[in-house]
Image (tube, rainbow, N blue to C red):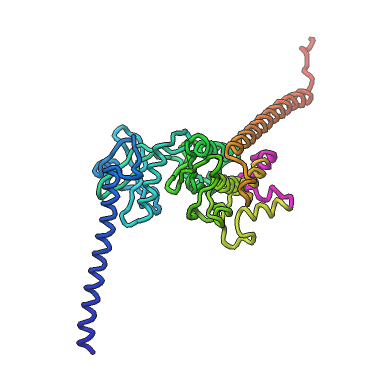
Amino acid sequence: MIIAIAVVVPLLIIIVAILTAWWFKKKKNNGENIGRTWQIGGEGFPKLESRQFSYNDLKKITNQFKTSIGTGGFGSVYLGLLEDGVQVAVKMHSNMSAQGAKELLAEAASLTRVHHKNLVSLMGYCIDENCMALVYEYMQGGNLHDKLTDNDRPLAWKQRLRIAYESAQGLEYLHKACNPPLIHRDVKTTNILLTKNLEAKLADFGLSRVFNNDAVVTHVSTRVVGTPGYVDPEYYLSNQLSTKSDVFSFGVVLLELITGRRPVVAGLDEGNLVQWVHQRLSEGDIKSIVDPKMQDGFDINSVWKVTNLACKCTEFTSSERPTMTAVVAELKESLDLESSAAEMHTGATSLITDVSHDSLEISFQSGMPAASGPSVR
């Protein structure tokens, strides 16, 4: 028995070692094959007009990959600094991630054909046999999800409205200005990035798909991908993708901006944010859904308008949802409504201050004793 164990155990160790070595070699070869495909310009190779970096360049601009600012299925994202002082985000593909390579290729292909102020810009790339990476503009303000969960510096309603309006413009560009249209497929608060001045830009095109939007084809059959809570239920059930799938996801983002809640919350009786909001609105109670961090700093008519828009965006049937062009127009109206309300409030406050000041002077003067004239000797 002891002899048998002595023979079997080393044999198992050798087998495991061989399989491990084979697996790592396979992973490495996969990375090399992808690198060669990019270098040679094989099928699906994106025409990149941006700057090309070497792996050594990336090590230098990231200070040996010192500061990680995010992770994903593709690998890690690092903060970098170019020689001209411009900060960048370096998205590295890990050879350990089979999913990441495909997403990175898709993102590169998408970013090279889109140019809009509300979409992140691709600044460069790296294609080595042992390295694949994208270099894009660094968004100092972080992402919308983190801003919504910041209790110390909560976003005001007007700031939320502007972020919604700007990110909607980026999504409208993908659907309307790109030819053929581009479906993002992963619209969510973590993929809406912000500058230090809170200007919004849509990011992460790793799951995007080209959409043949002609008179005949209105949907694309594809495997369901996306983030729970944001996925279009019609797409989930039918595998039929359309631009209205992005509209549904954006509607969920609008509800997050209004409520400050996440799309899926464990223990929530209504199941998800969309159902929870619909339940509260059916009771005619809109103030109960508004993020308490905003306190009373909003115009209720503006909130009603955006809530109604969000409900239309999250209709179960895609044909009943608005286009992103219609969404942009309604958000612009809501933003104007909020601005007008704020101006009226400022004017009223100024008037009250002036009236109070005049009243104070009158009260003060009426309370003064009559002045005595010079005495006659």
- Residue drawn at point x = 53 percent, y = 39 percent: 214
Residue with the most extreme front position: 216
Instruction: Tell me, yes or no, if residue 174 can be seen here.
Output: yes
| Front one among 84 and 167 | 167
Question: Is 331 situated above or below 319?
Answer: above
- Relative to 137, 348 lies left or right: right
Residue lying at 61% horizontally and 48% vertically, measured from the top left: 318
Q: Quadrant location of residue 52? A: top left
Nearer to me, 216 or 42: 216
Q: Can I make out residue 198 in this image?
A: no
| Residue 71 lies in the magenta-colored region | no
Q: Is residue 303 magenta?
A: yes
Which percent across, then down, holds residue 343? 65, 29
Based on the displayed image, in which of its 4 quarters is residue 356 positioned? top right
Image height of 168 relative to 373, above or below = below
**Rendering coords of residue 122 (x, y %):** 38, 38
The chief SS type of the magenta part is: loop
- Magenta stretch bounds: 283-304
Residue 100 in the image, given as x and y percentages of width and height: 37, 52
Q: Is residue 72 left or right of residue 327?
A: left
